[in-house]
Image (cartoon, rainbow, N blue to C red):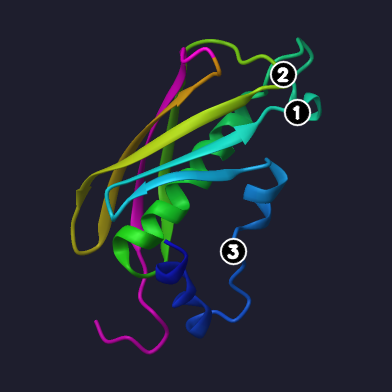
């Protein structure tokens, strides 16, 4: 996976791997099926909690986005940008544990990729689902 991601540094010298948001959420790459599926885990720190002491929904959306993003780069072979991101919250997530997010490519066209993902807590309970649609971008100087 790392070798596939390194080619982007030629076109974007400031390309940061892993992205700062991934690092901030203590993200870890767990497994990768080439151009099909990526699993990451994220640590639920108390500083990311809402007033009720559970993981705040926006940070859970960021965990999904931080899993979709690398998978999109790998599936498209070039940069992408999110057009929409939807999250369905199923149950609260307690602090001080890791969640596992698995994202899958559902369909890929010439300009778009559609993906879905699920997040599970340490007890293997489904905590949320997400879908996204991304636009495949062109490298600088690439022909239409």
Corner quadrant of residue 42 = top right
Residue 97 percent location from the top left of the image: 66, 22
Point out the stretch of residues depicted in magenta. Answer: 123-144
Q: Which residue is mark 2?
A: 95
- Crowding at dot 1, Cα within 10 Å, few <14 / some 14-19 / many 20+, comes out as some
Work out how far the residue at label 2 is from the one at label 3, CA to CA, in angstroms: 26 Å
Q: Earlier in the sequence, mark 2 or mark 1?
A: 1
Tell whether label 1 touches label 2 (CB within 8 Å): yes
In the rendered image, residue 131 lying in the magenta stretch gets the answer: yes
Work out how far the residue at label 3 is from the one at label 1, CA to CA, in angstroms: 22 Å
Q: Earlier in the sequence, mark 3 or mark 1?
A: 3
Q: Which residue is mark 1?
A: 45
Q: Secondary structure at mark 3?
A: loop
- Crowding at dot 3, Cα within 10 Å, few <14 / some 14-19 / many 20+, comes out as some
Residue 17 tag number: 3
In the rendered image, residue 1 lying in the magenta stretch gets the answer: no
Q: Residue at x 27, y 56 (%)?
A: 112
Residue 121 percent location from the top left of the image: 54, 19
Q: Nearer the viewer, residue 81 or 66?
A: 66
Q: Secondary structure at mark 2?
A: loop
């Amino acid at each position: 996976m790392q070798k596939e991601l390194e080619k982007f540094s030629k076109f974007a010298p400031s390309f940061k791997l892993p992205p700062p948001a991934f690092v901030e959420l203590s993200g870890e790459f767990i497994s990768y099926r080439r151009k099909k599926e990526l699993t990451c885990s994220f640590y639920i720190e108390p500083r990311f909690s809402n007033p009720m002491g559970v993981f705040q929904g926006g940070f859970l959306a960021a965990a999904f986005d931080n899993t979709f993003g690398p998978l999109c780069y790998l599936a498209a072979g070039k940069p992408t940008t999110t057009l929409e991101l939807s999250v369905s919250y199923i149950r609260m997530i307690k602090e001080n544990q890791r969640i596992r997010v698995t994202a899958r490519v559902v369909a890929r066209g010439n300009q778009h990729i559609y993906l879905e993902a699920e997040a599970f807590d340490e007890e293997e309970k489904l905590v949320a689902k997400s879908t996204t649609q991304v636009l495949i971008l062109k490298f600088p100087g690439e022909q239409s």
